[in-house]
Image: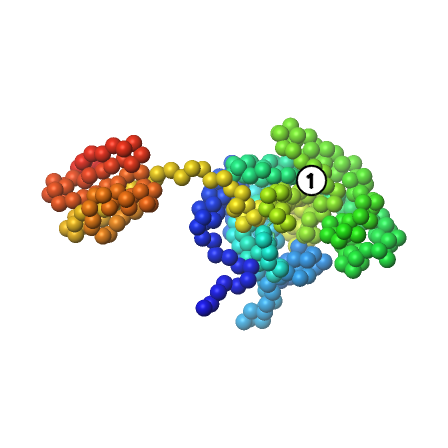
Amino acid sequence: MIRSLRGMNDILSPDNARFEYFLETATTIAKRYGFEYFEAPLLEETALFKRSVGESSDIVGKEMYQFTDKGGNDVCLRPEGTAGVVRAFIQNKLDRQGGIQRFFYHGPMFRYERPQKGRLREFHQFGVESFGVASVYEDASVIMMVADILKALGITFKLKLNSLGCQECMPPYRQKLVEFLETSAEQICEDCVRRKETNPIRVLDCKNGKCQELYVAAPKLMQNLCSCCDADFSILQKVLRDNGIDFEVDTHLVRGLDYYSKTAFEFVSDEIGAQSAIAGGGRYDRLVEFLEGKPTPAVGFAIGIERLLELIKMPEARREGYYFGAMDEEALTAVMKAAQTKRASERVIIEYVPKGLKAHLKGADRVNARYCAVIGENELKEGRIWIKDLQEKHEEVVAIDAL
Ligand code: HAM
């Protein structure tokens, strides 16, 4: 028997209903914040991710589904959504258009990681990217949007915040950090020795216990921010507090992708095990320029849909739409016609096998229909249909045309 690949799941009941409910909720809220739907290809040139997510990141270094296609192109399945949206933004000259442009998207992402609970090789994200607003109030807005989505789904969360500084304050801080790492070069793990050369701030979220202990004493970027980044970070915290959103400042939150500057954030849940990040994002003011577009400030986030599924509190299932049935073969075409008319505005389930009223009522119950509508021999002669409201427990026989 052919099985699905490791770390790639089918989304079946009851997760399918939760998945759909998540997308409906997130889409409604994204539109309320002024974002419009966007769709990009799953396959892109490998160079796109190398340049945006960064060669030193684990995603590009170890986890890409990379291959050469039949035309000899070096391509890969997207490991995340931001790079493709930025590529499209530039390619379609939206950077030249100026103004504010806000997009949301959802779909599968691929990372060749070691599968475990909450960590898949094919997983789904819902993400947003906002272009053209340099103001930190937009950062606050996108964070509040994640909070709105999670609250609407009944999910409790913790929000971690950090500032990664800008072109002005990051390079001198990086230098200080490298000097600190040099003094403890003997004690840090192999990965951190490598990170010290490629992207030193990534050492801060090293999972090695000994490194963690050591980095408690490392210089903090928070204490080395320039006055602009410092002021922005204060505003961000004030807006979140004013809007009743709890957060903790985590100076070791550096994110696994290289394109961030200034605001970085992660939403975590302590109810889903080790892979606790349910959403992450931040500002990336230099990425558009870095990919050869017109300099455009940007900020966004992505939510990992699979990690949320078990946390979603679904509204109580309500009876919905119509169940149609016939009591004998002759009535079936009349049933099909009546059902098809109703389908223009309602959910309709048709039973093609003629049977008795009791059996039809059971069928209607099974598919959670609000109304059970049946045509028998007498009704057919009179051009009428028997209908029962299963919620209000009320029944009557009406003209088919008046249904
Ligand atoms: P990310 O933190 O790499 O950010 O991924 C966002 C979310 O995707 C994570 O918080 C997690 O819930 C989910 N996720 C990541 N890897 C896996 C996996 N292997 N299995 C299941 N779920 C996973 C980004 O991707 C950025 N593009 C977010 C962003 C948008 N930043 C700015 N704009």
Residue 16 x/y as whole percent: 45, 49
Camera sees residue 338: no
Query: Above or below — where is 189 with respect to 35?
Result: below
**Quadrant in which the C terminus appears:** top left
Residue plotted at (68% across, 43% down):
264
Q: Which residue is mark 1?
A: 161
Q: Residues within 10 Å of mark 1 (few under 14, many from 20)?
A: many
Q: Nearer the viewer, residue 389 or 358?
A: 358
Q: Is residue 67 left or right of residue 357?
A: right
What is the three-letter code of the residue carrying label 1? Leu
Query: Above or below — where is 6 with respect to 337?
Result: below
Query: Above or below — where is 24 with respect to 70?
Result: above
For residue 365, what is the image quadrant? top left
Residue 12 x/y as whole percent: 45, 53
Q: Nearer the viewer, residue 325 or 91?
A: 325
Residue plotted at (55% across, 45% down):
308
Q: Is residue 114 left or right of residue 31?
A: right
Q: How is the image coloured?
A: rainbow
